[in-house]
Image (cartoon, rainbow, N blue to C red):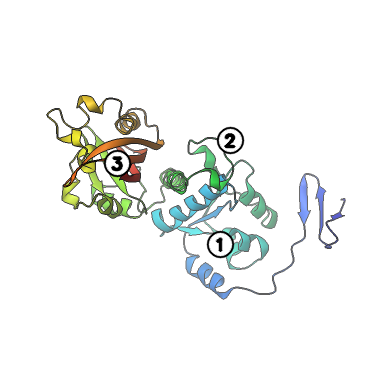
């Protein structure tokens, strides 16, 4: 085995039969809060360790792990501190070691988290999930700053939901479509304005608090309405009605939602301008949304709704 030193620091690393050997200084201190957390979480059957990379893919994986463990499946999953589990043999590593089911959520094909933990726990066999295979995006992007925070959160939600469905571990998303009584609870767990729509007729089933605040409406003014009626588009009140008026032809929002229902394809950041009816007259607004298929329904995330 060859060894090299870097910049005179005295650290040593080498390679041996396809492995990189790294010396890690033992921790001189231990966080009692971390140990208390690990002790409280030890009965949960599913441990989720995750890539914590600073790139775009790593950030999406990190947020997806948080959504999965703290929103979608908090009773069944425990979120692992990868640094703590890798660098010291205390509570976090024990969570990984003793988990009934271990999921490694990787930002990309480099598989950092599973490779790291395999280095300290021989024979570890996590279920490796490559997060960037679960959503569509421009693969030329690398940095977190190259994608809007709303798009990152939308992709993270997609990843978290697919994992919860695949492994049937989500209390709020254990089925691809939550039960009717859980619709509201499910979308309230997401910190963004959301509409949940059915396809035929194309109407809003429900909306979360953030959406109601954005549109300044009560729930009864949204449920059972078409999208244009929720947005107060002037063409929603014509004789032909929302989505059928000749002025609706070519509306990117309408077409995107229809395509999501038809093909199951998600759309990120589609936008259009709408003529909105207000008490003071007609005002041009910019509307931007992302769409995602949820069983037979469509989840519509409102990313922008303001004056042009």
Quadrant for residue 84, please give it.
Answer: bottom right
Q: Where is residue 282 in the image (x, y as percent from the top left)?
A: 21, 40
Q: Position of residue 227 (x, y in %)?
A: 24, 38
Q: Nearer the viewer, residue 39 or 11?
A: 11
Q: Position of residue 139 (x, y in %)?
A: 56, 35
Inter-mark Cα distance, 3 to 2: 32 Å
Q: Do callouts 3 and 1 mark residues in contact (Cβ within 8 Å)?
A: no
Q: Nearer the viewer, residue 136 or 245?
A: 245
State the residue at coordinates (19%, 36%).
234
State the residue at coordinates (31%, 31%).
261
Residue sticking out furthest to the left = 239
Q: Do callouts 3 and 2 mark residues in contact (Cβ within 8 Å)?
A: no
Inter-mark Cα distance, 1 to 2: 36 Å
Residue denoted by label 2: 140
Residue denoted by label 3: 285
Inter-mark Cα distance, 3 to 1: 50 Å
Task: Give the mark, 3 or 2, whose residue is nearer the N terminus.
Answer: 2
Left or right of 172, for residue 85:
right
Q: Nearer the viewer, residue 238 or 190?
A: 238
Task: Give the mark, 1 or 2, whose residue is nearer the N terminus.
Answer: 1
Residue denoted by label 1: 95
């Amino acid at each position: 085995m060859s060894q090299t030193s870097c910049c005179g620091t005295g650290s040593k690393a080498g390679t041996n039969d396809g492995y990189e050997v790294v010396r890690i200084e033992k921790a001189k201190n231990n966080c009692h809060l971390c140990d208390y957390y690990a002790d409280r979480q030890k009965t949960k059957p599913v441990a989720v360790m995750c890539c914590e990379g600073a790139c775009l893919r790593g950030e999406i994986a990190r947020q997806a792990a948080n959504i999965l463990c703290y929103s979608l499946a908090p009773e069944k999953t425990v979120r692992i501190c990868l640094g703590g589990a890798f660098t010291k043999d205390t509570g976090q590593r024990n969570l990984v070691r003793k988990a009934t089911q271990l999921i490694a959520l990787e930002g990309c094909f480099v598989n950092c988290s599973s490779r790291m933990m395999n280095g300290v726990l021989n024979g570890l066999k996590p279920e490796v999930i490559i997060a960037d295979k679960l959503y569509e995006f421009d693969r030329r992007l690398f940095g977190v700053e190259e994608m809007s925070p709303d798009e990152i959160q939308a992709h993270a939600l997609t990843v978290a939901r697919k994992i919860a469905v695949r492994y049937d571990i989500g209390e709020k998303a254990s089925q691809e479509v939550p039960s009717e009584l859980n619709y509201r609870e499910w979308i309230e767990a997401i910190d963004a304005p959301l509409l949940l729509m059915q396809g035929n007729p194309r109407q809003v089933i429900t909306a979360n608090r953030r959406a109601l605040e954005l549109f300044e409406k009560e729930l009864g003014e949204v449920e059972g309405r078409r999208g244009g009626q929720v947005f107060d588009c002037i063409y929603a009140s014509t004789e032909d009605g929302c989505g059928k008026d000749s002025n609706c032809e070519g509306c990117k929002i309408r077409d995107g939602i229809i395509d999501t229902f038809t093909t199951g394809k998600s759309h990120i950041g589609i936008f259009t301008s709408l003529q909105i009816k207000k008490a003071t007259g007609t005002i041009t607004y910019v509307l931007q949304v992302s769409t995602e298929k949820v069983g037979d329904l469509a989840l519509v995330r409102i990313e922008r709704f303001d004056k042009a």
